[in-house]
Amino acid sequence: MDIVIGVLIESFDLLNKMSIYLLFGFLFAGILHIFLKEGTIAKHLGKSDFSSVIKASLFGIPLPLCSCGVIPAALSLKKEGASKGAILSFLISTPTTGIDSILATYGLLGGVFAAFRVFAAFITGITAGLVANIFFKAERIFSEEKKDTVVKSCCSHHKAVPSNVVADKIKGVFQYAFVDLLKDTGVWILLGILIGGMISYFIPEVFISKYLGSGLQSMLIMMLVGIPMYVCASGSLPIVSALMLKGMSPGAAFVFLLAGPATNTAALTLITKEFGIKVTAIFLGSIVVCGLLLGMLLDKVWGYLNINITTHLMHKSAMFGPWMEIMASVILLAGILYNLFSPKNRHL
């Protein structure tokens, strides 16, 4: 019983530190979902050039789609005639960030890490896109496909928002933010927080500092762990936060935050089926190479700025106060549990 209580206390502490930022992030995600339409994105990504790759990465960064949910969006772009480079850029930059995870990263790991995560998603996305455009330069962008193709996601399906009435749009924002999006990510966030609590409680600092403290070895380990896992961009944060508090390098943490949300075995299988083995190789190769290089860069930046993650977390707690953090955690938990156990969602 003492062990269970200890893990729950550590988990709730992590939840408190990120709940406020997640709530604001979900709200902004809802606004983006209502006012930034998929068709608007698709019409900018048809050319096989540098600008389409840049646009795809920039469009993808704020969108709150997981590595599984981004596949249908990518297939829709393919159907609209987007280039392979643009689609690959979108496939990488979208699941590795999202406005909700960016704000949660700021809350748990600080502004430097949050800004670097956005920068890295952009760089990795355009790298994959440019390589694809060069590699497939001689090929036709994509053959025309039937417009009535139905693409199914492994995430829950989101309802379109009817009419243009302001009240309906506001309702649509909250519906997507605190029902649809929480339905998709809530379980993974709770699982990530629980794993983070278990790491904080069970794993000694000496173990982390010995095997994951710094260097290429720790990054390779986190890359190998992250690639096959299914973990959302927000759900992975409490895991790496707990590991960094135990002594893991920020570079190794970043590598997991890049590889974990961007890939998993199901997503890799779908990408291979729909786009081919060459596209999958460019996709994975870009993530591995950019992840390791950018991870080493982050370690250098972190050391130069002499950032202390423990001091940062203490400062964030003092900024909001414990009661506000607890209130945000209760609201977030209530939303997740409601969507999980609501009778209309039990089939999920």
Image (cartoon, rainbow, N blue to C red):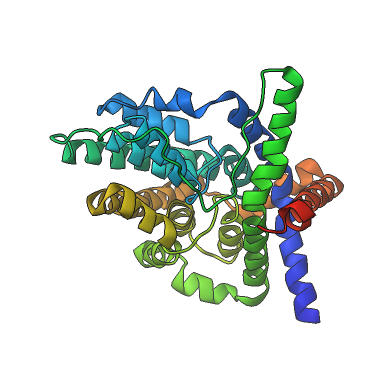
Between 6 and 263, the residue placed more toward the observer is 263
Residue 167 is situated, as x and y percent measured from the top left of the image, at: 76, 22
Seen as rendered, the residue at the extreme bottom is 1
Seen as rendered, the residue at the extreme top is 165
**Residue 245 drawn above or below residue 168:** below
Q: Is residue 250 left or right of residue 199?
A: left
Q: Is residue 283 left or right of residue 311?
A: left
Quadrant where the N terminus sits is: bottom right
Mark yes or no: residue 204 visible: yes
Seen as rendered, the residue at the extreme left is 138
* Quadrant hosting residue 49: top left
Q: Residue at x 84, y 47 (%)?
A: 327
**Residue 267 drawn above or below residue 164:** below
Residue 4 is situated, as x and y percent measured from the top left of the image, at: 76, 76
Between 344 and 329, the residue placed more toward the observer is 344
- Number of callouts in the render? 0
Residue 297 is situated, as x and y percent measured from the top left of the image, at: 38, 48
Between 242 and 144, the residue placed more toward the observer is 144
Quadrant where the C terminus sits is: bottom right
Q: Residue at x 29, y 52 (%)?
A: 280
Q: Residue at x 62, y 58 (%)?
A: 188
Q: Is residue 3 left or right of residue 95?
A: right
Residue 116 is situated, as x and y percent measured from the top left of the image, at: 47, 41
Q: Residue at x 48, y 39 (%)?
A: 118
Q: Is residue 336 left or right of residue 74?
A: right
**Residue 216 drawn above or below residue 136:** below
Between 39 and 7, the residue placed more toward the observer is 39
Mark yes or no: residue 264 visible: no
